[in-house]
Amino acid sequence: MAFDCNKERRVSSPDNCSSICTEGTLVQANPLSHYWKPKGLKSLNKLENQKSSHGSVLSDSNSEQEAEASNEASASTCGVKCFTDLPAALVCEVLARLDAKDLGIVSCVSTLLHALATDHQGWKKLYCERWGLPDLPAALNGPLLPGAPLDGKSWKTFFVEREFRSKSFMGRFNVDILRGHNEDVRAVFLLVSANLIFTGGRDSVVRMWKMEEGLLIDTSRALGGTIRAIAADSRLLVSGGTNAYIQCWRAVEGNDHLFHISGSGTDQNAEFRLWGHEGPVTCLALDSLRIYSGSWDMTVRVWDRAQMECVQKFMHADWVWSLALRGNTVASTAGRDAYVWDIRDGELTSLVSNAHVGNAYSLSWTHLVDVLFTGGEDGAIRLFNVSDVSDDDEDIKPVATWVPHSGPVHSLAFEYPWLVSASSDGRIALIDLRKLLTPKRSSKGLRVKSFDASAIEPPQRMLHGVGCDLFSIAIGADRIVCVGEDGSVRVWNFSEALEIERRAQALRSLRQENRMRRRKAQVEMNANGRRPDQCSIAMKKNQLKGDKSTTWHNKRTINEKVKS
């Protein structure tokens, strides 16, 4: 959509209008379109006759007549009065093709467009492309309602708040250390919607922490073996480890913390196990219908959440280390390779061979486009674009590569626009992918923006000071949670940066409001034919000098007293 408006006359150009109408895809908006009076092609002929009769020098009245005639000709040619007069379905379709910045600009044009752009479902699409649908169940026993707004908030409010929160990771932070595990911690999961952190490790227990307060809420009984993977949503918590089964807990109705993992005095149906793997379970994931598990038995299994039984099995050529979900596809890493599977037909859609030198330990996936991030034993992080893969391609090459670590990358986590990694060198890398993942519209949908691979920026931030191997990492809200060999759970809290930014925005808004108030008062004063008092203006400008003069006189009086 394009708006071609003459800023001086506040009217539209007839040439541009005719070109717009022939293309059939662009619509012209004119603030004076309600005053148009179409008269057919006679107005256009009348305009040409006026131009030829008066010559090159025209009076002001003739200019106004030409403007009116051009407006009439434009209206007769286009057949459209203004943008808001279009059918509602067409207006919604136009707004749906705008990005967040353009929608914000449109909402500033008029009150009507502000209402249309604010309540438009395009904000939901923009939100889901970046962060996916939030899981917001109406009840624990009821159906899962993905994407339902909370507290009557609009999708624009959700988008703006999430975008604002994503900027906090370059600001000030505090580190909270949670202690409770006796041995190294291998898995961590952050459930932001419930304000919970789940951890598990070599001591074979799962611990549940309060994210804001950092308090230990509950501890499971010893499950046997090392806990290597944890996943959760608001209705189900699952963990897996070296005992080759999946331990599951259902959410308990009326429980403030959703789950009662200790198991004492609760319904026996709230805790159960899934058997099927023949080796240690190394990775887990959930969606509203299924459970996904990967194991060293070289399989990824898909479990139906209603029947609690395995419905699909994907075979690999090596041990499965990690997996990630996106819609109806699941990506996994096994050995050195990365796989992309279609859940609907069970077929392998993409294969990335030799993604790393050594094992590909970690994997993450974006909601924006078909982009995979892998972390390997060689300490590298690689980006692969699997959206434009054709049958003729022999190998999928990495689009971008970062080497921020000197040891294996054991874990990756992504929340737009940040990719975070944890390595055995005890460091955490934060990579901002905002420029890299900016979408561009095409007939095939969203694609990665073309860029120069040699101009890829290094990680924007490195978090140090851990001093031990790091095995798992999670990011959400304004927190980064990491666990490692020393048995502690470290939480990087960036909420202070959010408060600083909020105060700065409030101050900028106050200054802008004062500036507009002074400008309005000046305009009213000029309209009334009065001029501001020059002496008062001079006093305001020289107020600092006046203070300095007073200080100098006081000092001179003191010096005279001392001399006397």
Image (spheres, rainbow, N blue to C red):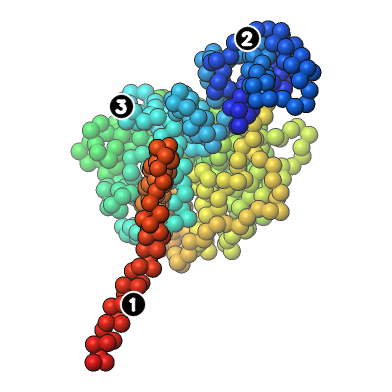
Query: Is disc 1 placed on a helix, strand or loop?
Result: helix
Q: To which residue does mark 2 refer?
A: 38
The image quadrant where one finds the N terminus is: top right
Looking at the rendered structure, the kind of residue marked 2 is Pro
Q: To which residue does mark 1 refer?
A: 552
Query: Is disc 2 placed on a helix, strand or loop?
Result: loop
Q: Nearer the viewer, residue 417 or 257?
A: 417
Q: Quadrant of residue 534?
A: bottom left
Q: To which residue does mark 3 refer?
A: 139
Q: Nearer the viewer, residue 291 or 80?
A: 80
Mark 2 crowd level (few <14, some 14–19, many ≥20, 10 Å Cα)? some
Query: Who's the residue at 71% across and 54% down the image?
Result: 454
The image quadrant where one finds the C terminus is: bottom left
What is the distance, in whole Å, between disc 3 and disc 1 at their CAs? 73 Å
Q: Quadrant of residue 87?
A: top right
Query: Who's the residue at 35% across and 59% down the image?
Result: 176
Query: Is disc 3 placed on a helix, strand or loop?
Result: loop
The number of numbered badges drawn on the structure is 3
Mark yes or no: residue 170 visible.
yes
Q: Residue furthest bottom?
A: 564
What is the distance, in whole Å, between disc 1 and disc 2 at their CAs? 74 Å
Q: Are marks 3 and 2 in contact (CB under 8 Å)?
A: no
Q: Nearer the viewer, residue 17 or 287?
A: 17
Looking at the rendered structure, the kind of residue marked 3 is Ala
Q: Nearer the viewer, residue 114 or 297?
A: 114
